[in-house]
Amino acid sequence: MIEIGFHGKDKCVEILASAAFKEGKFCQAFVSDGWSFCRIDDKPVRTRSLECCPDIAILNDERLLTEVECDGIVIVNSPNPPEELKLFGDVVSVDATRHVLDIPSPSLNGNVPDTFHVRQYDDMELVLELVAKPVINTVMLGAIAALKIVSMQSIADVMRVKNPKLVNAAWEIYKELERKQELAEL
């Protein structure tokens, strides 16, 4: 069994669980202590505890690195490479915010630009809090697919139903991590 934790009470675990179920896997998705968790296995998941030390932790902000307890892989939303984050263990960084900010958004009476661009906002922190952070964990599902836990196609199929605007950003993260893995193997 593999346990995946996402910082925040996030609906992305529903997408991950649905994608795993679509592939014939057994899964649980739940929220506990400010984290969202998904357990995935090829056999029935009998664990019922809400306590979890994830094998993979997904963080939507590098400032959360000091709060995570994970014996496995930490995937963090950061433009900085893992070696600059000065941490021990397996840390993978991907700039999910960049991918999220490239998602076209609906215009509200012409007051909101068609695409979020950093240079168009005085208070980028507010924009990220209100708009980007709720979707960063969802597009980080591309990183889970790059680890071959669930296929990117299954995740994309479920995302198209739940939040179609995020599918391309998740595919971009998947491709980015696939390229990083290929370079690491050379």
Image (cartoon, rainbow, N blue to C red):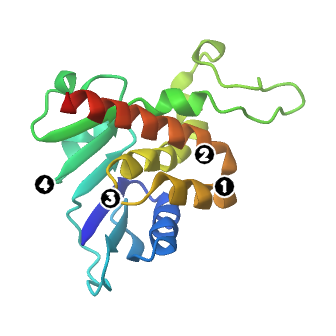
Helix, strand or loop at label 3? It is: strand
Which amino acid, mark 1? Arg
Mark 4 neighbour class, 10 Å CA radius: few under 14, some 14 to 19, many 20 or more: few
Question: Picture coordinates of residue 69 (x, y %)?
Answer: 17, 53
Which amino acid, mark 3? Gly
Question: Picture coordinates of residue 34 (x, y %)?
Answer: 37, 59
- Return the disc, 3 or 4, that comes first in the chain's sequence: 3
Which residue is identified by label 4? 71
Compute the Cα span from label 2 to label 1.
Answer: 7 Å
Which amino acid, mark 4? Asp
Q: Quadrant of the N terminus?
A: bottom left
Q: Residue at x 55, y 45 (%)?
A: 135
Which amino acid, mark 2? Val
Which residue is identified by label 1? 160
Which residue is identified by label 2? 167
- Return the disc, 3 or 2, that comes first in the chain's sequence: 3
Helix, strand or loop at label 4? It is: loop
- Quadrant location of residue 176? top left
- Position of 121 with respect to 174 (left or right) is right
- Return the disc, 2 or 1, that comes first in the chain's sequence: 1
Q: How many marks?
A: 4
